């Protein structure tokens, strides 16, 4: 690609929203635009945990000859804008809104201002500002095409019809050209037409649809029907102003981390090195996922009863809200073991490792000894699982994760679901699904399928691959704006 004519070089400002699950793919997008598609890139960092976020960006970019420019926006004081018990989403949304004035002043002060702004699902309020400053605006949906299609179609759905058929009669929700969405996999809080989120999400989706284009962290071969429905001549195309590009997977990979000198080098690695190939199941619920104390106890017993080797990332229990909090992951997790059943650590010391708070996930999933993953189905974790060639136990907690679980288990066939009863997944069920993935033939078949998916993912992001070519088209659109 010709990088010599800087006047014609698009400059992408990528606005990140708080939370590792948002930051990590945003940085991957920035790296890809910079290194493979000759964009200039400035990452605007909005975070509530600056130390961890800085270190994360450093890990992802420090090996690059020219890393992207990173601007950390001042942390706004949001306390007076939030009610007494704000949800995680409320905190993110208010933090984003309150950061807009500093984003605007920074952009206005730049000698080489960005020509386009890329935001995620939480950054859509910045889009009118981008327009006002003469920039193009794009939305990076850090998720799959099915949920993207759901979002894009959302404003076109008739709320009364949704309420009568889907919510009351539990009929599947039909998104044109895509898998039907079963009631049990619904993102409940969004789909209550009388509920507080319906109108808000409709408005967000309208802004997304009105942007200059949408990027999704998936690839054509992973989701052929949904990407086709969203494509140039697809049935959903008329709902968006600009094109919808599947540009993924944008994901941290083991190969790159080893090149960057970030190999796993601690007691987890030493333990993994001693285990047989594909014998360990990794258990982790993303950057913020939490469970009740009762659920933690069941999980501990379930792992023990499964008699399979494990690495388990344990967080303190949170009752009620599975999306937990913003954890200060550098903060150790002292006292955590008290929540585990008495004698658990001692009894399982040969079988497994308990890691408090945060683990080097890409390295663990990529280690040859790891063969399975109990996951909350956050989309980054799913992509990392594919690169780690592991089969999954799908245990969704919140947000769109139930849709992801359905996609992985019923459609793609690389996961089995852990079923809850009265809101808790019992120990016997946990032991059963872990053994299905680790011991039974279907686990092997799923790993074989995942290996094929990994190969198709690698092909998609290489030159002439589907995602690479989508980013090339995206660049062409960004260039047209420069003229
Ligand atoms: N992650 C990690 N170590 C942990 C927990 C999470 O490295 O102990 C990373 C994980 O690899 C992924 C991200 O945090 O890249 C979580 O994103 P995901 O979309 O899976 O879930 P979310 O946190 O957004 O729910």
Image (tube, helix red, strand yellow):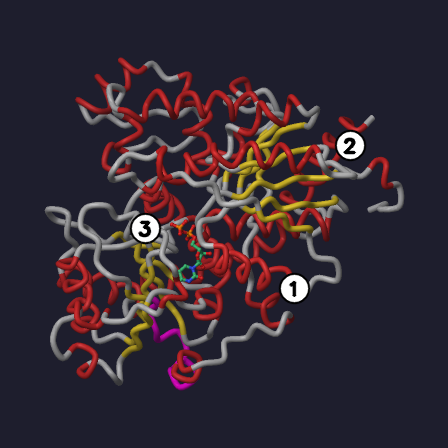
**The image quarter in which residue 119 lies:** top right
According to the picture, the residue beneath numbered tag 2 turns out to be 479
- Residue 325's mark? 3
The x and y percentages for residue 146 are 43, 35
Q: CA distance from mark 1 to mark 2?
A: 28 Å
Q: Earlier in the sequence, mark 2 or mark 3?
A: 3
Q: What kind of element bears circle 2?
A: helix
In the image: residue 441, left or right of residue 228:
left
- Between 447 and 366, the one lying in front of the other is 366
Q: Nearer the viewer, mark 1 or mark 2?
A: 1
Q: What kind of element bears circle 1?
A: loop
Magenta stretch, residue numbers: 272-282
Q: Earlier in the sequence, mark 3 or mark 1?
A: 1
In the image: residue 286, left or right of residue 307:
right
- Residue 62's mark? 1
**The image quarter in which residue 78 lies:** top left
Vertically, is 453 above or below 115? below
Q: What kind of element bears circle 3?
A: loop
> Answer yes or no: do the residues labelled 3 and 1 have beta carbons within 8 Å?
no
Which quarter of the frame holds ligand 1?
Answer: bottom left
Q: CA distance from mark 2 to mark 3?
A: 40 Å
Give the residue displayed 78% in from the left and 27% down from the top.
480
Q: Does mark 1 have its CB less than 8 Å from ligand 1?
A: no
The x and y percentages for residue 177 are 45, 27
- Whether residue 225 is visible here, answered yes or no, is no
The x and y percentages for residue 20 are 46, 53
Give the residue displayed 74% in from the left and 45% down from the top.
40
In the image: residue 13, left or right of residue 457:
right
């Amino acid at each position: 690609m010709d990088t010599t004519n800087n006047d014609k070089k698009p400059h992408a400002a990528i606005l990140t929203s708080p939370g590792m699950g948002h930051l990590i793919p945003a940085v991957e997008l920035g790296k890809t635009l910079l290194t493979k598609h000759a964009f200039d890139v400035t990452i605007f960092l909005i975070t509530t945990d600056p130390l961890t976020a800085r270190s994360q960006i450093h890990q992802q970019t420090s090996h690059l000859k020219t890393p992207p420019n990173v601007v950390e926006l001042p942390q706004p004081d949001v306390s007076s804008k939030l009610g007494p018990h704000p949800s995680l989403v409320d905190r993110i949304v208010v933090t984003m809104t309150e950061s807009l004035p500093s984003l605007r002043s920074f952009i206005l002060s730049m000698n080489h201002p960005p020509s386009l702004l890329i935001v995620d699902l939480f950054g859509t309020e910045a889009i009118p500002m981008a327009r006002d400053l003469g920039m193009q605006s794009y939305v990076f949906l850090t998720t799959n095409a099915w949920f993207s299609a759901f979002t894009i179609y959302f404003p076109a759905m008739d709320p009364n019809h949704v309420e009568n058929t889907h919510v009351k009669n539990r009929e599947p929700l039909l998104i044109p050209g895509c898998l039907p969405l079963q009631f049990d996999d619904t993102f409940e809080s969004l789909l209550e037409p009388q509920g507080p989120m319906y109108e808000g999400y409709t408005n967000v989706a309208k802004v997304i649809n009105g942007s200059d284009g949408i990027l999704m962290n998936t690839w054509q071969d992973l989701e052929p029907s949904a990407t086709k429905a969203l494509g140039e001549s697809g049935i959903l195309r008329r709902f968006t102003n600009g094109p919808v590009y599947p540009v993924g997977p944008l994901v941290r990979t083991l190969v790159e981390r080893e090149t960057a000198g970030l190999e796993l080098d601690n007691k987890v690695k030493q333990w993994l090195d001693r285990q047989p190939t594909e014998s360990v199941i990794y258990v982790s619920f993303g950057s913020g996922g939490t469970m009740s104390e009762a659920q933690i106890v069941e999980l501990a017993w379930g792992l023990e009863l499964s008699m399979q080797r494990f690495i388990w990332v344990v967080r303190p229990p949170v009752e009620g809200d599975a999306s937990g909090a913003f954890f200060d992951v550098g903060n150790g997790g002292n006292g955590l073991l008290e929540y585990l059943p008495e004698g658990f650590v001692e009894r399982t010391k040969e079988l497994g490792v308990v890691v408090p708070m945060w683990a080097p996930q890409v390295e663990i999933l990529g280690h040859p000894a790891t063969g399975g993953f109990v996951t909350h189905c956050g989309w980054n974790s799913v992509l990392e699982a594919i690169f780690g060639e592991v089969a999954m136990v799908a245990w969704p907690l919140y947000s769109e994760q139930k849709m992801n679980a359905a996609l992985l288990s019923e459609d793609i066939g690389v996961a089995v679901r852990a079923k809850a009863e009265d809101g808790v997944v019992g120990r016997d069920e946990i032991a059963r699904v872990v053994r299905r993935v680790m011991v039974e033939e279907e686990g092997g078949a799923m790993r074989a399928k995942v290996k094929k998916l990994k190969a198709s993912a690698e092909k998609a992001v290489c030159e002439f691959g589907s995602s690479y070519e989508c980013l090339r088209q995206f660049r062409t659109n960004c260039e047209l704006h420069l003229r």
